[in-house]
Image (cartoon, grey):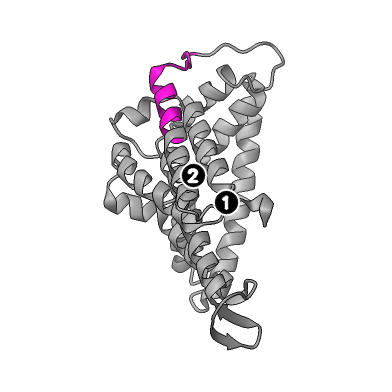
Amino acid sequence: MSILTPVAGTQAIYRVNPVAKFATAMVISVGLLLSVDWVSASVALAFEAVLFFWAGIGPRRFVARTWPIFIAAAFAGVTIALYATASGQTYAQFLFAHVTEGSVNLAIATALRVLAIALPAVVLFLTIDPTDLADGLGQVVRLPSRFVIGALGALRLIGLFAQDWRALEHARRARGVADRGRVRRFAGQAFALLVLSIRRGSKLATAMEARGFGGTTKRTWARASVIGAPEVALVLIGVAVTGIAIATSVLTGHWNFLATR
């Protein structure tokens, strides 16, 4: 199951315009990137954890889609704890690794910030239907129709990657190819998937050109994409979460504006 594959649902968040979801994710990301401290990230995560239930993804599906983010946050924290600039009390030191009070605090803040920025972005993306996204980009953002339709075709093919990978694995096993050696088997399957994806993309591009998707005339849209009260409410929620997180960090004295570092 791909982290990028959208999920279906009946909650109100699924009916919100995708443009508003991207704007909300951008507001949260920009606000939390202004400082590296654990307070603002923790406050934002606390509010986001409550709002995640609104998406209706469910705990099991949520973990299945977001586990790479938790691993990335852990690796980022460990790396910074070992190799960040030393400051404060020294806890451990070995060769180039130097674990100090300052590096540990920075590692915790970084890991929490990765989670606070990435998790809402992924959850919002999972609630986006590719067709609704194309409608929003074409009608609200006014992007070129050729780019929008091409992006829609690419998004529609994302879900086929996992199916192609399983089919390639079964086919290679049936032929006795690369039964031994995980690295060799993975490299062979990855190259085969790349070739298959290029061929499929070429066929899709040819088919879309034949149907007039590459034309220069003004395109009409089957469904209207509008910005209304639900979209404004979602963006305001993002602004409120970011504002409360920043205000809490400033009031507690943990705000660490990046421009002053």
Residue 56 in the image: above or below residue 76: above
Residue furthest out toward the right: 216
Q: Is residue 78 visible?
A: no
Pinpoint residue 175: horizontal percent, then vertical percent. Answer: 48, 67
Q: CA distance from mark 1 to mark 2?
A: 9 Å
Q: On the image, numbered disc 1 is attached to which residue? A: 35
Does the magenta-highlighted stretch encompass residue 104?
no
Q: Nearer the viewer, residue 94 or 177?
A: 94
The residue under label 1 is which amino acid type? Ser
Which residue sits at x=59%, y=47%? Answer: 34
User: Residue at the spot x=65%, y=72% of the render?
Assistant: 85
Q: Which mark is residue 72?
A: none
Sequence-first tag of 1 and 2: 1
Residue contact at pointers 1 and 2, CB within 8 angstroms: yes
Which residue is at a point 57% across and 51% down the rendered structure image?
35
Task: Report x, y in % for residue 93.
Answer: 58, 87
- Along the line of sight, which residue is nearer the eye, 244 or 142? 244
Tag 2 residue = 246
Packing grade of label 1 (10 A; few <14, some 14-19, many >=20) is: many
Q: Amino acid at mark 2?
A: Ile
Question: Does residue 111 show up?
Answer: yes
* SS type, badge 1: loop
Classed neighbour count for the residue bearing mark 2: other residues with Cα under 10 Å, few (<14), some (14–19), many (≥20)? many
Q: Which residues are magenta?
A: 222-238
Q: Secondary structure at mark 2?
A: helix
**How many labels, in total?**
2
- Which percent across, then down, holds residue 53? 28, 42
Q: Nearer the viewer, residue 136 or 21?
A: 21
Q: Nearer the viewer, residue 229 or 209?
A: 229
Residue 232 magenta-highlighted: yes
